[in-house]
Image (tube, rainbow, N blue to C red):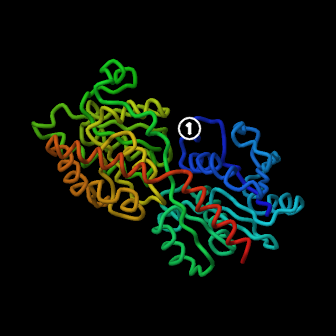
Amino acid sequence: MTVALDAYHLTREPGIARDGTHRYAVGLFDHLFGLDGSIQYHLWVRDVFDVPEGWRHANVQVFPIPPGNRTWWHTVRFRSEAKRRGADVLFNINGAAPVLGGVKRLSMVHDVIPFLYPEFFDQRRLHALKLTIGIACRHAEGLVVNSEATASDVRRLFGRTKPIWVTPLATDLGAMRREASSVSDDELDTLGVRAKRYVLNVGGINPRKNLVGLIRAFGEIASRPEQADLGLVVAGPKGWKDDAVYQTVAELGLEGRVDFVGFVDDAQIATLMARCECFAYPSHYEGFGLPILEAFALGARVVTSATSSMPEVGGDVATYADPSDPGSIAQALTETLTERADVRRDRIAQGLERARAFTWRRTAEATLRALKELHAR
C-alpha cells in the first residue's frame, strides 16, 4: 500500500508550530513511519518546513508542494500529483480532501467549528474552512477525528454513514515539567508576569477561547480579600475578533491584574504551568482540547468547559464549568483555588497519570489501522 500524505500545514514558524494541527502531525509522523515498513509513504510538504531526520525511513519519500493557492492544492492538485505516483490512499492532516475520488481519501477532521460557530470567524476564512471541511465530511471515504464528540458532530451535521475512526491526541511536554520551587520570581518577571499567584490561560486570542467569559469570572473572584494578590496570565499570540477581550479588561478595571504575555515557547509554558494556581481553559468548543492534556502533563490543575470534547480529555480530574456563564467559571475557579493541600497534591498526581495514558504511539497505531481498513474496503 502506498499512502500519500498532504502535510501542507507543517511549518517552521514558531507561532503555528504550537498549533494543535502541527503538533498532531509531528507526533503522528514521529511514530507512524516506523510501524510497518511494508507501507510506502509519499509525504508532501512546503519549503517552509524542514523534514526531521527521524522521518527519513526507507519507506518515506518527500515531495515539495508547489507554490500556489492552498485550497486548490488540497482539493484538486494533491490528488493528481499523488495519483500520478501510484497512491492507494490519500491522507490529509487538516480537514481537507480532494473533490474527486478515484483514490480512497482519508482526512483528519480536527473539528467542525465553522459549521457550529460561524460567528467566530471572518468571512473569508469561514468560506475556505467550510468548503474544505465540508468536502471531507461529505465525500471522503474515511475520516479520522480526535474525539467521540467530533465524530458525533460530524454524523449529526452531515448525516455521514461512511467510516469514522477516533484517534485521540497526546503530548510530550511532560518531559519539560518543572517543580514550582524551581521557578524564581525573576523568571516570571522576564516573561512579563507581575502577580506571583496567578490563573493561567494558554492559546490564541480569539472568540472561541472565551477569554471574555474568563476575564469576567476572574473579575468576580479578584475582588475578594483572600484573592487580593491573584492575577490572570494570558499566554498566546493575538488572533482575530479580539477587541472585546481588551475592552472587558478595561471595563472591569483589571489592567493591573491581567497580563497578556504574547507567544511563549514550550519551555516558557512549562515555567508558567509550574507556578500557576491552576490552568483555566473555558473554551466554547474544542475538537480535542490539547492544552488540557499539556497542563496535566506539566503538573497543573485544570478548570475547563463541560462541553464538546473537553470532558473526554479531562476525565474526572478536571473541574468543569458552563462556558456561557461567567458565574459558573468563577465557581469552578473558586473550588480549585480553595482546595486543601492534600487534595491539590492528589489532583496534580491524577493529572500526570491521565496525561501518560495518551501517547503518540497509540495515535499512530490507531491511524495505521484506519489506513489499512480503508484500503481493504
Height in image: 94 above or below 271?
below
Q: Residues within 10 Å of mark 1 (few under 14, many from 20)?
A: some
Percent position of residue 239, x then y: 50, 44
Height in image: 366 above or below 137?
above
Say what amino acid the circle numbered 1 marks: Gly
Percent position of residue 287, x then y: 48, 60
Of residue 132 and residue 363, the one placed in the foreground of this image is: 363
Percent position of residue 111, x then y: 53, 62
Q: Is residue 347 left or right of residue 174?
A: left
Q: Is residue 373 left or right of residue 312?
A: right
Mark 1, residue position:
15
> Which quarter of the rendered picture does the N terminus lie within?
bottom right
Q: Is residue 314 visible?
A: yes
Q: Is residue 67 visible?
A: no
Picture quadrant where residue 48 is located: top right
- Residue extending farthest top: 186
Q: Is residue 308 left or right of residue 34?
A: left
Rendered residue at 32%/62% (across/down)? 306
Tell me how many marks there are.
Answer: 1
> Which quarter of the rendered picture does the C terminus lie within?
bottom right
- Residue extending farthest left: 225
Of residue 318 and residue 252, the one placed in the foreground of this image is: 318
Rendered residue at 66%/71% (across/down)? 142
Rendered residue at 71%/49% (across/down)? 8
Percent position of residue 241, x then y: 47, 49
Q: Secondary structure at mark 1?
A: helix
